Amino acid sequence: MSGRKPLIAGNWKMHKTIKETLDLINGIKAGLQGNEAADVLVAPPFTALSAAAGAIQGSTILLAGQNLHQEPSGAYTGEVSGQMIHDTGATHVIIGHSERRQYFGETDDLVNLKVKAALAAGLIPIFCLGETLGEREAGGTFEVLGRQLEGGLKGFSAEEAAKIIVAYEPVWAIGTGKTATNDQAQEVHYFLRGLLGKIFEKRLASETRILYGGSVKPDNAADLLACPDVDGALVGGASLKVDSFIGIIHFDR
Ligand code: PEP
């Protein structure tokens, strides 16, 4: 037993109005009955965060933003700061998702600044990294992941790094229906944990939660979560419906 409690996190991306958010949260709350196996987190869009914070009260559901700006405030039209996210009642924030890297040009350096900004605002970063299909096929998986991990966590003390949740999301498995095999996921998670141990310290590495993301569904969650270094799931599509998200949360049944 690792002692790391699994975390099942739902990334809702640009889906759900406020009403849809409340309906989904109420459905998840009802479905959670008797859940003890995993912590549960949802990441609705910014517009629904405050309402979601009200809806999760009295439950164990955790709340996250999906991104933040690296500056605490300023003339950045359309952007949202860590403090603003914290102010809604959210406790976590997703950073460096592959869609942010791919469509919004986020680099390892920017991700690093965003992780710093999240910690400064009192938010727990869910720091995402992952290789593309081309990088995997060219044999570059570990080099890419090593660069992303070291770049994203550059300059952090062990105390700061201990607050971070890592999410391995192979880009080729996100929204594609293709999932990493258990062996592929375990191999990468083991590598990332080893690297965390080298950059910081072994104890920190053994306590850090490393989530897997990429087409996680109720029918593959149990096998993925049985891998010794997989400590939960970051779920996109299957987190948008009560039944499939609850099916993943109850992976142990
Ligand atoms: C994601 O976007 O973080 C994700 C893992 O998506 P999906 O589960 O739909 O592949």
Image: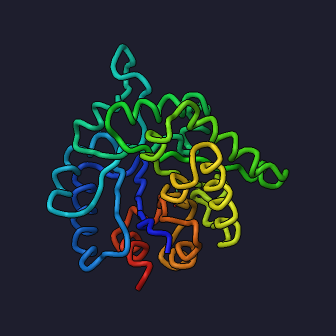
Asked if 245 appears above or below 206 in the picture, the reply is below
The x and y percentages for residue 168 are 58, 55
Asked if 35 appears above or below 206 in the picture, the reply is below
Q: Is 169 on the left or on the right of 240, as rendered? A: right
Q: Write the residue at 62% across / 43% down.
A: 199
Q: Write the residue at 56% across / 32% down.
A: 104
The x and y percentages for residue 222 are 51, 78
The x and y percentages for residue 56 are 20, 57
Residues 243 and 73: in front is 73
Q: Is 214 on the left or on the right of 139, as rendered? A: left
Q: Write the residue at 26% across / 80% down.
A: 34
Where residue 229 sits, quadrant-wise, is bottom right
Q: Is 24 on the left or on the right of 151, as rendered? A: left
**Number of dots carrying numbers:** 0
Extreme residue toward the right, this view:
138
Extreme residue toward the bottom, this view:
253
Q: Is 224 on the left or on the right of 46, as rendered? A: right
Quarter placement of the C terminus: bottom left
Residues 86 and 120: in front is 120
Residues 29 and 159: in front is 159
The x and y percentages for residue 232 are 48, 65
Extreme residue toward the top, this view:
75
Q: What's the coloring here? A: rainbow
Q: Write the residue at 40% across / 58% down.
A: 10
